[in-house]
Image (cartoon, rainbow, N blue to C red):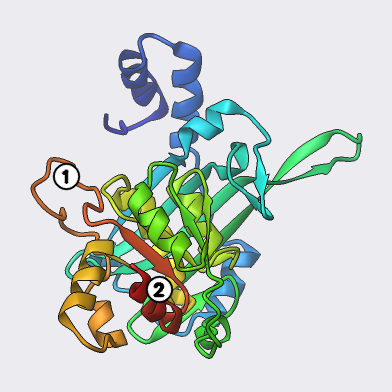
Amino acid sequence: MEVQEDIAATFRHLVSVIDGNEKAAQLLADIIHTEISLETNEARILRDKLDFELPLDELAIWIDPIDCTAQYMSNSPGEMVNGILVSGITCATVLIGVFHRGTGVPVAGVINQPFFSEAKDKQKNQQWRGRRIWGVAYNEHCYSFLGNNPKLNQNDEFVSDRNFKIAVSSSESEEIKDKLLSSGVEIVSVSGVGHKLLQVIDRNVDFYILSHASSYKWDTCAAHAIICSLGGDVISFDEALALKSNMKDIDKIGLLKCRLKYHTPDDKKGEKWSNTSGVIAFLSFSKVFELLQYL
């Protein structure tokens, strides 16, 4: 559909698109044509802190308006496993990812988690509270909701005890899960691609691993940019394993060649905008070098 020249025209167009539901059409038309001011105090403070310009005419956006739709529709408080909410309405997120149209590299991301926590309002009723997290990573410039020093977030100096915690999908192969478990790591099955990536950002897990093509560019772009702003990255599972097979010693430069890109489809398998080679998301390069030895 197309946004029309005024509310009335957009309303008429929406009515034809959503099978005559005039109430929904009016609500949507009103929202679409609402004037939005970005000159908030929060925006002014942020603009003062960011000391670089983004090439806006070279950027494009992936949007996932409701990631983890099934959990959102369930309206369930979900299940907690080892301190991680693995299902329920909390897993639902809104994902907005910005990438460079020439290189496909993620540049900025915003994740809105509207059902982050519950609290009581003045009338003692339970109400959901949301949160927004964001990050910008452009050339050598990094800034995020945590500040502007990604080195504070990397923890690249660590003593390995193989006690990694890894978020996986319920559809992950038994072969991959068996390999990981036999290496002494802990795996947690978590709903929603965006929510699994949030577990990496929040440091509830060390990695998110997906070995097959069941995520899409709109699922990963926003969190990928935030993870880059924190000093980590999101790479192709298959390409990283191929790199391990072909190189004796993997370094950061080599691994960055496996980074997910967002401007072109991955291959010709029919899932046009899926991450067909899988996903490994992480905050620490040192840790991912060791992880690859287990796979």
In three-dimensional space, the C-alpha distance between marks 1 and 2, rounded to whole angstroms, equals 29 Å
Q: Residue furthest front?
A: 182
- Quadrant for residue 163, please give it: bottom right
Q: Is residue 205 above or below residue 214?
A: below
Could you tell me residue 213's position as x and y percent? 26, 48
Residues 11 and 229: in front is: 229
Choose the circle earlier in sequence order: 1 or 2.
1
Q: Residue furthest right?
A: 123
Amino acid found under the numbered disc labelled 2: Leu
Q: Are marks 1 and 2 in contact (CB under 8 Å)?
A: no
Tell me the quadrant of the picture where the N terminus can be found: top left
Residue shown at 41% from the left, 81% from the top: 285
Is 269 situated left or right of 91 in this image? left
Q: Is residue 95 visible?
A: yes
Q: Is residue 97 visible?
A: no
- Give the label on residue 291, or none: 2
- Give the label on residue 125, or none: none
Could you tell me residue 45's position as x and y percent? 61, 74
Q: Is residue 10 above or below residue 185?
A: above
Residue shown at 58% from the left, 85% from the top: 152
Residue shown at 45% from the left, 68% from the top: 183
Read off the residue under disc 1.
272
Is 69 situated left or right of 61 in this image? right
